[in-house]
Image (cartoon, coloured by chain):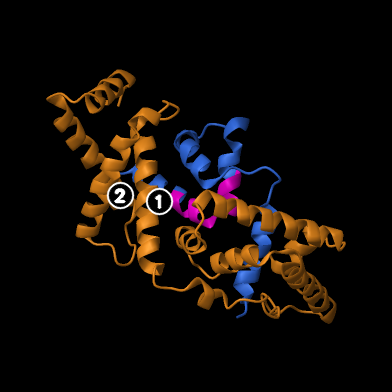
Chain colours: A blue, B orange
C-alpha cells in the first residue's frame, strides 16, 4: 500500500492548512448558510465565521458540499 | 423571499394545520430544484435518485425545524442540510462494500514517490528530504488508527464510510484526522522543515 504523488501533495496541503483550533463538520454545517450568503453578496466575512472557510481548506468533503450548495442556492436550473 | 413571508412559511411548517401540507410541498419543490442544481453532472444520479434524496431531505429538515436560528435564510439553511444528506448518501452507496483494511493495507504509508520531475539535482534532493521526513513522521508519530483514517481519506474513501468502519462518529473521525495533521505539522517543524519548504517541495 503506497501513496501516490498527488496524495502526498494533498496531505501536504492539508498539513499546511491545519490550525490549532478547527470546527467540526457538523459545526461547519450549522454556520455555512450564513457564510455562503455573505460570499454571494460579496460582503466581508466576520471573525466569527472565518472558521467556516478555514474548515473547507482542510476538509475536501465540506469543500465539495460548499460548491454544491453554491450551485443549489444560486439558481437558475 | 422577504422576512415576513419566510416567518409565515416557517409557522405553517411548524404547525400541524391545514396549511402545513401546502407549506411542505413548497419546501419540497425548493429542495428538489436545489438538489438538481447541486448534483448536476454527478455520475449515477438520475431523476429517481433526486426524488428519493429530496424526500429524505424534506423529512430531515422538518425534523430539525426547531434548530433553525435565523442566521441565514431558511431556504439556505434547509438547502445545506439537503446537500449534506445527499452527498453522505451518495458517498456511502459508492463505498460501502470497500474494506477499510484492504484499502489501507495496514502498516505505514509506503515509500515516498517523487511529486513531479523537477529541474536541478539540488531541488530534487531537497524534495526527497522533505518527502522522506514526512513519511518518517507519518510512520513514527501517528497511531495506527490515525494513519488508517488519513490514508483512507487520501485514497478517496468518504468520511461517512471511514467512520462507519471504525465504529466512530463523523465528528470523532474529524477530530482523529485533525489530531493526526497537527502531529504531522509539529513533527515536520521539530525536524527543522519549514512550511515554506513543504510548500515548495509539493507545489502545495
**Residue that badge 2 annotates:** B35
Asked whether, in this view, residue B19 is left or right of residue B71, the answer is left
Q: Is residue A64 above or below residue B149?
A: above
Q: Position of residue A67 (x, y in %)?
A: 44, 50
Q: Is residue B16 above or below residue A51?
A: above
**Closer to us: A24 or A13:** A24
Tell me the quadrant of the picture where the N terminus of chain A can be found. Answer: bottom right
**Residue that badge 1 annotates:** A68
Q: Residue at x 74, y 57 (%)?
A: B183
Q: Position of residue B10 (x, y in %)?
A: 28, 25
Q: Mark 2 — on which chain does it sit? A: B
Q: Position of residue B95 (x, y in %)?
A: 41, 68
Residue A39 seen in the current view: no
The magenta span reads A54-65
Q: Residue at x 47, y 62 (%)?
A: B158
Q: Is residue B66 above or below residue B160?
A: above
Q: Quadrant of residue B76?
A: top left
Query: What residue occupies the far left of the structure in this picture?
Result: B18
Q: Mark 1 — on which chain does it sit? A: A
Asked whether, in this view, residue B96 is left or right of residue B20, the answer is right
Residue B102 seen in the current view: yes
Q: Residue at x 70, y 78 (%)?
A: B112
Helix, strand or loop under label 1: helix
Q: CA distance from mark 1 to mark 2?
A: 8 Å
Helix, strand or loop under label 2: helix
Query: What residue occupies the far right of the structure in this picture?
Result: B192
Query: What residue occupies the far front of the structure in this picture?
Result: B167
Amino acid at each position: 500500500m503506497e501513496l501516490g504523488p498527488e496524495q502526498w501533495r494533498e496531505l501536504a496541503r492539508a498539513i499546511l492548512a491545519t490550525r490549532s483550533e478547527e470546527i467540526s463538520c457538523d459545526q461547519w454545517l450549522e454556520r455555512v448558510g450564513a457564510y455562503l450568503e455573505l460570499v454571494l453578496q460579496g460582503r466581508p466575512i466576520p471573525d466569527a465565521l472565518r472558521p467556516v472557510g478555514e474548515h473547507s481548506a482542510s476538509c475536501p468533503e465540506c469543500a465539495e458540499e460548499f460548491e454544491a450548495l453554491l450551485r443549489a442556492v444560486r439558481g437558475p436550473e | 423571499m422577504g422576512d415576513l413571508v419566510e416567518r409565515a412559511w416557517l409557522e405553517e411548517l411548524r404547525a400541524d394545520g391545514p396549511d402545513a401540507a401546502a407549506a411542505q410541498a413548497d419546501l419540497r419543490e425548493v429542495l428538489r430544484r436545489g438538489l438538481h442544481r447541486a448534483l448536476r453532472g454527478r455520475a449515477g444520479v438520475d431523476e429517481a435518485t433526486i426524488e428519493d434524496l429530496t424526500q429524505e431531505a424534506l423529512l430531515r429538515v422538518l425534523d430539525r425545524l426547531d434548530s433553525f436560528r435565523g442566521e441565514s435564510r431558511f431556504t439556505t439553511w434547509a438547502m445545506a442540510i439537503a446537500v449534506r444528506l445527499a452527498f453522505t448518501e451518495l458517498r456511502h452507496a459508492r463505498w460501502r462494500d470497500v474494506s477499510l483494511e484492504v484499502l489501507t493495507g495496514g502498516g505505514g504509508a509506503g515509500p515516498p514517490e517523487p511529486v513531479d520531475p523537477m529541474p536541478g539535482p539540488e531541488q530534487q534532493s531537497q524534495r526527497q528530504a522533505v518527502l522522506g521526513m514526512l513519511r518518517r513522521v507519518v510512520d513514527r508519530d501517528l497511531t495506527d488508527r490515525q494513519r488508517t483514517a488519513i490514508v483512507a481519506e487520501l485514497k478517496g474513501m468518504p468520511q461517512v464510510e471511514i467512520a462507519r468502519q471504525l465504529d466512530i462518529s463523523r465528528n470523532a473521525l474529524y477530530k482523529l484526522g485533525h489530531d493526526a495533521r497537527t502531529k504531522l505539522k509539529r513533527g515536520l517543524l521539530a525536524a527543522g522543515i519549514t512550511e515554506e519548504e513543504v510548500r515548495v517541495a509539493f507545489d502545495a
